[in-house]
Amino acid sequence: MGEVLFTSAVDGLLIGIIYGLAAMGLTLIFGVMDVINLAHGPLIALGMFGVYLLFTILGLNPFIAVILVAVLGLLLGVVIYFVAVNRVIDAPPLSSLLSTFSVNMIIIGVGTALFTTSSYNVDYTLGTVEVGFFRAPGARIAASLVALLTTALLYLFLYRTRPGKYVRAVANNRIAAELMGIPSTRILALAFGIGAMLAITAGGLIATILPINILAGGSYELKSFVIVVLGGLGNPLGALLGGLILGLIEGLVPVFMKTTWVPVIEYVLFVLILLVRPQGLLGAKE
Amino acid sequence: MKILEVKNVTKRFGGLTAVNNVTFDLEEGEILGLIGPNGAGKTTLFNCINGVYPPTEGRIIFRGKDITGRPTYTMAHLGLSRTHQIVRPLNELTVLENVMVGACYGRENMGLNEARRTAQEVLEFVGMAERAEMLAGALNVAQKKRLEMARALAARPYLLLLDEVLAGLNTAEVTAMLDTIRRIREQGITIIMIEHIMHAVMNLSDRIIVLNYGSLIAEGTPEEVSQNPEVIEAYLGDPELAERLLEEEMA
Amino acid sequence: MKRLIRPGLLIPLAMILVLAVWPLLSGNPASAREAAFTLIMSMALAASLNIILGYTGYVSFGHIVFFGVGGYAGFWAITQLGWHILPAALLGGLVAAVIAWLLGLAVLRLRGAYFALATIGILEAMKALVINLDFLGGPVGMELHFSEYKRYGGPMQSLWMLYWAMVFMAILVVVVSYLIKTSKFGLGLMAIREDEDAAEVMGVITPRAKTWAYVLSAVFPGIIGVIFFFKNGNIEPDSAFRLHFSIEWIVMIMLGGAGTVLGPVLGGGLYQWLRKTLLTSPIFKDYQLVVAGVMLLLIVLFVPTGIIGWLRARSAKLRRVFE
């Protein structure tokens, strides 16, 4: 039993890191511009399909594909910002909720038309890693490591580079940042681009280890909401922590009850946190 | 009759004491000026009185009833109205509708028709009657301030809390507003006004209380308060310079 | 009664009635009726959501949860307890109202985006829960036997009965919506929407007002859910709790004009008509969602007050005609 629990827990934590990465994208955008990006799910789905296509058509190693897709994701995020978000950045929150949701509909609509709702698989394996009784697919470990690496890169960007500092300044107080000469619109676009990139990267990594379909993005988006609220809206570290917690829940709960109860627990937890501790475990942005 | 009794009210936000053991009384029909440098805790005190948050310590007695910590939405019904430092118009509603909200949910719990009549009356009183059908969001600052006042008056309050109602107005607008405030007092409404425009407060108030760093440092008539060295120091730091300036003002 | 004889109410009612009698005059009544049913149902659902969203400013993204919960309650009563559709529909409404009241106690304390997210969480939690409940049919849902319709005179009769029931519901919702908008209660709701804190300072008892608005906005979808799923002959979690549907209601409201009586009716009709046209067009068939998305984006960016909102902003006269 102990072995089962341990394996399930580690399994959950590994995928939890990737969930956390996705959620970081969502929370970063909220933290910087107070916008909840409802196109988050489709972006994850785009990451999945991007890697799938590059792997299947061009034979690229999926992890290389992830990098390519991530860069494209950054650009896409910037475009989405200018098309759907910039104009309503100061409008009531409903406006950006709906405008990002419309992007969601557009992406899903195109995606469904092109790929239908069937499942696809990236047939890629890195063998199995065995340590004592513990075994896990090598690809899963690799994907988690890449996720961690991306998190570290994000941290370096935010705290060790000048654009990163600008992002943090705008997140803290946009008007003050503008008064100090920071081009806020460009920074907001950059931040949105990074947020999108994180979601797309996470999607790409998921594609290396799990089957994908266009609607799965939706379920990962919901997971991201849960994580983000759990960790604290606007808090990237909280997103990582939340991801780990969620991954743990997903790994351990099926050991004790039917898998179909996992979503119930996740969403009830989600609503409870919103009610009892809306600032999340690590504290939300003010 | 004492319409308001503030007893030992303290408000702390974590480590910061915004209001420190403030005690004062208010007689019915008075105009009380509440002054003090920026950040002295004046608006915080208003917020405690009007239920935005409860005081950490102390009691607030309104017309003999203990209203400490009661939620904000019970205040208008008791006869306590308030305007805000930064105006809060209901933008997508018309001026008339804005004031009707005040009338409907105020002390007299009016129905729509009575509220409409009251609103029209009050708009006449504050001089906004021709703008009744305009959307509140389209008004300029001075008009929004009058609207805010009209909304508060439509609730038929016993006590009106005015928070920097003159801020942002030009000289002519200030004079007009001061006149309106006098006429409100003539209606029998008691007023506490937070204000920074010294000549206005000094001229209008029967009594003044002064806050500094959350504590009450002086209380008395405008003359008494303006001579009070602690008050002068709180505002200006140099008593002699201040004395000279005040002499010019009062002249 | 005199209060009701106003263009603000009569125009939306006329729209519904004209649409309602169209199948009777059309060459193919059955197919026209089906089309009209969908349109009228959309109008009713959009108008219900408008009470909490348009009037009060609380964006309930997961509002379909009440449609599903009510639908399940009524469907269960019909198939397991042998109830007649009328009490079953009322039960659906009651269950939806009670759930709204309970949930409201908790989530109406939240503001803005937090509230919106919470409603999504509630919807997903409810869906996930129902999937696990075997007495409600689990992931497969419940089905009713064809013979159920005999009680109402057979399938043909039933379809027409349910059609008129839906028309009645739409009229009811619009009348209630108008009464709210022109009442003191509605004024309080709109004050909350514009500035909740200022509304409180003015004496609006916000927790009570919001709860009533939420409950009222839930009871009608609850009843409508029973009518819809009874007509469908089955109910399952995916269609009863599909997030996309309630978001479509938001699009309808935005298109027509949030916070107006006529807006959701106009928007509901227009949106469904557009959708129908796209679905039958060979070019756009697969891109229906894309077109809806583009529509929503354009509305949000350029005409956020919707068609009726735009008209009402033009002049005071138009404001008196279009409520």
Image (cartoon, grey):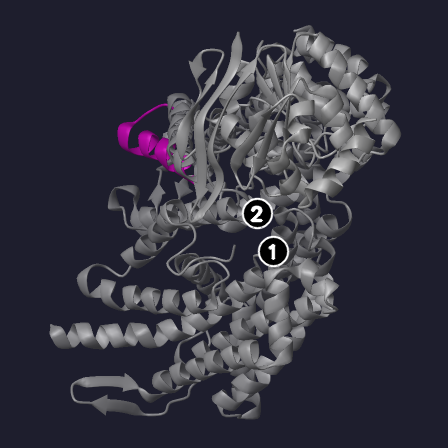
| Residue C290 against residue B36 in the figure, above or below | below
Chain containing mark 1? A
Which portion, as a residue range, is magenta? C68-84
The residue at 64%/28% (across/down) is: B225
The percent coordinates of residue A136 (x first, y second) are: 27, 84
**Quadrant that contains the N terminus of chain C:** top right
Label count reads 2
Looking at the rendered structure, the secondary structure element under dot 1 is helix
Looking at the rendered structure, the secondary structure element under dot 2 is helix
Find the residue positioned furthest to the front.
B240
Q: Label 1 is placed on what type of residue?
A: Phe
Q: Is residue A190 left or right of residue C152?
A: right
Q: Nearer the viewer, residue A118 or A44?
A: A44
Residue C300 visible in the snapshot: yes
Residue C89 is drawn in which quadrant? top left
The percent coordinates of residue C5 (x first, y second) are: 72, 11
The residue at 57%/47% (across/down) is: C247
Residue B58 is drawn in which quadrant? top left
| Residue A239 against residue A64 in the figure, above or below | above
Residue B12 is drawn in which quadrant? top left
* Numbered tag placed on residue A101 in the rendering: 1
The percent coordinates of residue A194 (x first, y second) are: 59, 73
Q: Nearer the viewer, residue B169 or B91?
A: B169
Mark 2 and mark 1 residues within 8 Å of each other at the beta carbon: yes
Q: How busy is the neighbourhood of tag 2: few (under 14 within 10 Å), some, or many (20 plus)?
A: some
Q: Label 2 is placed on what type of residue?
A: Ile
**Quadrant that contains the C terminus of chain C:** top right
